[in-house]
């Protein structure tokens, strides 16, 4: 297996956690005799500092020439006063648009030993395994027109979806559900928004092609409540862009931390992989960031771009074993639980690396 990977480590803790993900990919490549080659590219705040833009053309070209793209995180507080189009996050939105990936897969798994680390009761979180399928190229994040008129003290964003956009991401969700518990929960705000009414109509039509999958609809506000009260009731959760962003981040409560969550964006020219968490510039360079989200993202690279399912599963099993052994970075550590081993970013990464059985 030969795989060219564009590495967009980005800002804050991005380079730290990405390094641990690369160590895992290198170990898999070495063991299996695979060839993984990497190209380091700039995005976000570091790109603004170096090139004056959050997404240089060289990054676009280099990513399009790769077989997969691994991103760390973007964003820094020093750019908060910049217009949205010039902030680090604009680079992330643009690379998503350029690559064309429309289906963002965000698994949220509650590892058994972490049940006590969640703010929720263990009996609520234990055994939770949810796959969020977030539409990534439509909705308020990309709809036009969009503007902010400071003089008139007005701002405007546009939520737009076509039937084709909804259908293609819905089919991804239903196909995934067929290999899981055969249930899709579609989230919308159809009692208020015409766009959500279209969303619900199209999802209902797609469901007819998947008679073995149960479909339910949830309004986004009630879903936010149910996700905390009864998360075990959900399997594949299908959402538009904004709702998916919010709900999948909320799922960090179930896992104990946003640092536990990976993601993969599929359906475009090049698959884009990134942990769900942000750049966390306040802890950058301190060696305390949680690399699990990035490592699990590397497992998704192995599964979806390299076609190495066995190896991807081995990484995920290693993560579970390390957590069961009590290893904890600062975000998932709790002082009142015996047997915990509080470790640094690098120590957590090495523990997972050592636990991988190939």
Image (cartoon, rainbow, N blue to C red):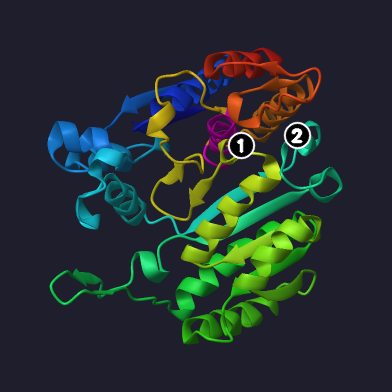
Which quadrant holds residue 358? top right
Q: Secondary structure at mark 2?
A: helix
| Circles 2 and 1 in contact, beta carbons < 8 Å | yes
x%, y% of residue 119?
71, 44
The mark lying in front, picked from 2 and 1, is 2
Whether residue 221 is visible, yes or no, is: yes
Q: Main secondary structure of the magenta part?
A: helix
Which quadrant holds residue 112? top right
Magenta segment, which residues?
Answer: 292-305
For label 2, the residue is 114
Q: Is residue 295 magenta?
A: yes
Q: Secondary structure at mark 1?
A: helix
Q: How many marks?
A: 2
Q: CA distance from mark 2 to mark 1?
A: 11 Å
Say whether residue 52 is left or right of residue 174: left
In primary-sequence order, the first of circles 2 and 1 is 2
x%, y% of residue 131?
66, 53
């Amino acid at each position: 297996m030969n795989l060219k990977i564009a590495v967009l480590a980005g800002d804050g803790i991005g380079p730290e956690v990405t390094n641990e993900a690369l160590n895992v990919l290198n170990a898999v490549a070495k063991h299996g005799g695979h060839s993984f080659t990497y190209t380091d590219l700039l995005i976000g705040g570091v790109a603004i500092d170096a090139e004056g833009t959050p997404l240089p053309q060289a990054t676009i070209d280099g990513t399009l020439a790769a077989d997969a793209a691994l991103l760390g995180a973007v964003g820094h507080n020093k750019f908060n006063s910049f217009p949205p189009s010039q902030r680090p996050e604009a680079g992330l939105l643009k690379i998503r648009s350029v690559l064309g990936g429309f289906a963002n897969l965000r698994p949220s798994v509650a590892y058994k030993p972490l049940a006590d680390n969640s703010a929720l009761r263990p009996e609520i979180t234990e055994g939770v395994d949810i796959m969020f399928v977030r539409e990534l190229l439509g909705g308020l994040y990309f709809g036009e027109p969009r503007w902010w008129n400071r003089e008139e003290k007005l701002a405007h964003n546009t939520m737009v979806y076509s039937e084709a956009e909804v259908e293609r991401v819905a089919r991804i969700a239903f196909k995934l559900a067929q290999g899981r518990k055969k249930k899709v929960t579609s989230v919308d705000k159809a009692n208020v928004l015409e766009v959500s009414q279209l969303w619900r109509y199209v999802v209902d039509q797609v469901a007819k092609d998947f008679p073995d999958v149960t479909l339910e609809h949830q309004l986004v506000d009630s879903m936010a409540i149910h996700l905390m009260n009864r998360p075990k009731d959900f399997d594949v959760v299908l959402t538009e862009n904004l709702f998916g962003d919010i709900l999948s981040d909320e799922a960090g409560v179930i896992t104990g931390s946003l640092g536990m969550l990976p993601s993969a964006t599929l359906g475009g020219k090049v698959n884009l992989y990134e942990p769900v968490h942000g750049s966390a510039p306040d802890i950058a360079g301190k060696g305390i960031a949680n690399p699990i989200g990035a490592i699990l993202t590397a497992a998704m690279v192995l599964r979806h771009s390299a076609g190495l399912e066995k190896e991807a599963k081995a990484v995920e099993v290693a993560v579970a074993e390390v957590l069961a052994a009590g290893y904890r970075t600062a975000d998932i550590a709790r002082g009142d639980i015996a047997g915990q081993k509080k470790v640094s970013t690098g120590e957590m990464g090495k523990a997972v690396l050592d636990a991988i059985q190939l």
